[in-house]
Image (cartoon, grey):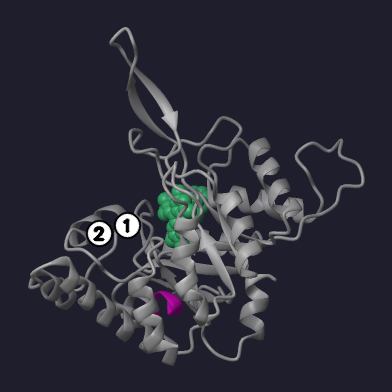
Amino acid sequence: MKVVDHIRNAKQTLFSLEILPPLKGQDINSIFSAIEPLMEFNPPFIDVTYHREEYVYKKRENGLLEKVATKKRPGTVGICAAIMNRFKVDAVPHIICGGFSKEETENALIDLNFLGIDNVLALRGDAIKTEGVFIPEKDGNNYATDLIKQITDLNKGCYLFDDVENAAPSNFCIGIAGYPEKHFEAPNMKTDLKYLKKKIELGAEYIVTQMFFNNKKFFEFEKLCREEGITVPIIPGLKPLTTKKQLTILPSVFHIDIPEDLADAVEKCKNNEEVKKVGIEWCIAQSKELKKAGVPILHYYSMSKSDSIKAIASSVF
Ligand code: FAD
């Protein structure tokens, strides 16, 4: 079922989560055991992230270093199929522009369609670490807007080359990313919202936000979206802090603020067990306030670990 239909049919705020594929070489049970303890909260769908290739240097026999592209977390599509089969819930694969030509994107969408997956989260993706700025593939999509257009075209039965006759349309429900604290490349919030609205006009049906630790930022973002004429459901994305290091890593990677009160509380912790407790308490408070405000879904970035999320969901749902 489509994410928007789950929202339409829901009588109260739903619980959902995002997982990441395991590192190459780990087996699927690491994913199953992260999801199993959370199934009691009835997630209608589970998001699975997509990780593009990275460049690493491998030493060859002649002693020279060779730059090779490798995917550390492959398997997004396979994991989606495995989750649907095992847990009988919908899976939402993330699909990105980076690393894909349009033809490869079309083939990936055909695979998803054949697997009975009718949801995708359409994203641009980030730059490869060594490149600094996002560079699309030759013949690839530049922005999420281009990717959404391609998916919407496929939903109308328009494949890339018009020699496909009597083409069966796909039926994807398209989700997109939104940034309560602005996407880091956008010159200002207004411009970012202009493109967010464009993504909706091109066919996206709901927004999932970047993580945030201050609900005020979410409520302000929601208000700005509504003022801009964006009427689709906005799903807040939440992540409980679990380590001290995240105080500096999260702002640097995700371009988000950590409120002073939370940062102070984490700094006072003697170890990461204590940080986990602080993170859980903070996330429970955020979740309860958002639920009270009537958000359609509380979406948790689990990082494929269930203990903090289980503690939060037990208190909120
Ligand atoms: P876009 O919507 O393309 O926006 C990128 C920037 O360009 C913004 O500044 C925007 O204002 C601007 N812009 C947008 N459209 C246009 C246009 N047509 N012309 C000019 N400027 C434009 N990354 C992964 O690699 N894998 C994942 O699985 C993944 N999952 C994510 C899930 C969520 C919920 C979120 C919030 C992010 C996720 N990301 C993931 C990270 C995401 O790929 C990055 O944040 C990326 O930098 C931007 O993606 P986007 O889809 O928001 O890009």
Q: Residue at x 36, y 33 (%)?
A: 131
Q: Is residue 188 above or below residue 133?
A: below
Identify the residue position indicated by label 2 in the image: 251
Separation of marks 1 and 2 at Cα, in angstroms = 5 Å
Proximity of marks 1 and 2: CB atoms separated by less than 8 Å: yes
Q: Is 131 in front, or is 226?
A: 131
314 on left or right of 85: left
Helix or strand or loop: what does disc 1 sit on? helix
Image quarter in which the C terminus is found: bottom left
Q: Residue at x 56, y 76 (%)?
A: 233
169 on left or right of 283: right
Q: Is residue 168 above or below residue 67?
A: below
Q: Is residue 41 among what the camera can see? A: yes
Image quarter in which the N terminus is found: bottom right
The dominant secondary structure in magenta is helix
Residue type pointed to by label 1: Phe
Residue segment shown in magenta: 219-223
